[in-house]
Amino acid sequence: MSTTYGTFPGARPRRLRTTPAMRRMVAEYRLHPSDLILPAFVREGVTEPVPISAMPGVVQHSRDTLRKAAVEAVEAGVSGIMLFGVPEEAKKDALGTAGTDPDGILQVAIRDVKAEVGDELVIMSDLCLDEFTDHGHCGVLDSDGRVDNDATLERYAEMAQVQADAGVHVVGPSGMMDGQVGVIRDALDQTGHEDVSVLAYTAKYASAFYGPFREAVGSSLQGDRKTYQQDPANLRESMRELALDLEEGADMVMVKPALPYLDVLAKVAEAVDVPVAAYQISGEYAMVEAAAANGWIDRERAILETLTGIKRAGANMILTYWATEVARQLG
């Protein structure tokens, strides 16, 4: 009996997939708790957390539960927390003045978290007006109802100062105004906050996946944000935004959303020598949770797979609502 050995493959990649131990040993990318940043919402005037119906498991925190969430994040090994303030409806106005009030909910939340965990967690803040305006846009409107870029920059400079005064480590300007990074950097430096970093929302797309976030921050948005957030069809535009943000002094850059824009994330990561973040946004979270609740996918595997894909595309940091849960699993 003869055997024709040449008909079988000599190279067998499956040899490196034979056991869990083998797969762990040869894995090219590994998630670590320190890769993760927890976005968190704090709502003014509540004493108990308020569930967000479109994001099962995520809440609008009270001040007390936010402190607890920050401690849990530290214990799990999460590296940072990104804070969003949700003011009382009556405090919203056309200029978003609650966003620059030293006693506004976001500044109070920054001080609370700082007092609770100090420097054990990198405290980040959303530097944008949309949560605080009665029209829901990310800036000041002109007489025609359009967002006035340069008038908005003046408000951002004020926001940067009050957030830094409250003790934030990193500001995250998310409004996609032209020149925002440079104005914010100047405002921080001129007020003695040279050590506060700027995480630039370099490529923030006008995405359908923000839907659940609107509920999370109690958005009052009228219309859409397509005149300032980036068109989903464009990639070269992201690279132009990237060059401008770096020139203006960005310490870190971000792509948002994550999964629909992994190609953009990879392109950005290849081009820079600063840390790169990606934000796994509310709609991405909601899709996985909804599919898992219906028994259509394995929830834990899907969560880890999406996060690994984001890291593989080039993210050094990932903002995800699963941050603490996943960090505990990885730890």
Image: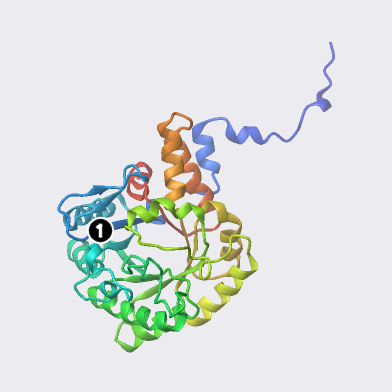
Image vertical order of residue 84 relative to residue 33, above or below? below
Residue 325, percent from left and from top = 33, 44
In the rendered image of this protein, does residue 214 appear above or below residue 53?
Answer: below
Secondary structure type for disc 1 = strand
Of all residues, the one furthest to the bottom in this rendering is 190
Q: Nearer the viewer, residue 127 or 186?
A: 127
On the rendered image, what quadrant is the C terminus found in?
Answer: top left
Amino acid at the residue labelled 1 = Val
| Residue 17 location (% of width, % of height) | 58, 34
Foreground residue, 325 or 179?
Answer: 179
Q: Quadrant of the N terminus?
A: top right
Q: Say whether residue 289 is left or right of residue 65.
A: right
Instruction: Name which residue lies at 34% across and 82% down.
Output: 188
Instruction: Tell me residue 16's x, y (percent).
Output: 60, 36
The residue to which callout 1 is attached is: 42
Q: Residues within 10 Å of mark 1 (few under 14, many from 20)?
A: many
